[in-house]
Image (cartoon, helix red, strand yellow):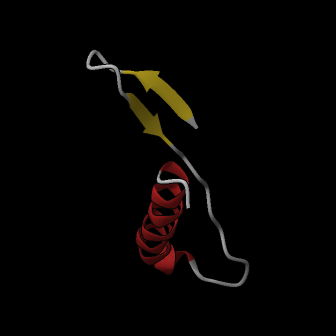
Amino acid sequence: MEVAGTESGGSRVCWTEDLSVRGVPGAFDGLLARVGRLVFGRALEGVLRGR
């Protein structure tokens, strides 16, 4: 996770996560990546909103 300040006084957060699922063929990497972005994006939004 990288957090940087912005000129307007806010913050910019960059979160990188590597995910692999044992037994799932590489052909599904794109699908897993999209699902991972959705799930972790929602988790981060919840953290930032204090939920």
Q: Dividing the image into 4 quarters, which one contains the C terminus?
A: bottom right
Give the image quarter of residue 38.
bottom left
Q: Position of residue 1 (x, y in %)?
A: 58, 38
Q: Residue at x 39, y 32 (%)?
A: 12
Q: In the picture provided, is 12 more to the left or to the right than 26?
A: left
| Residue situated furthest left in the rendering | 8
Q: How many marks?
A: 0
Point out the residue furthest to the top here. Answer: 7
Query: 14 above or below 17?
Result: above
- The residue lying at 51 percent from left, 60 percent from top is 46
Q: Residue at x 53, y 63 (%)?
A: 43
Question: Measured along the vertical axis of the image, is residue 36 above or below residue 2?
Answer: below
Closest to the observer, 7 or 23: 7
Q: Is residue 21 above or below residue 33?
A: below
Q: Nearer the viewer, residue 34 or 29?
A: 34
Say if 22 sits above or below 46 in the image. Answer: below
- Which of the 4 image quarters holds residue 9? top left
x%, y% of residue 47?
55, 54
Q: Tell which residue pokes out farthest to the right in this image.
A: 22
**What residue lies at 26% left-to-right and 20% top-to-bottom?**
8
Image coordinates for residue 20, horizontal then vertical, percent: 65, 68
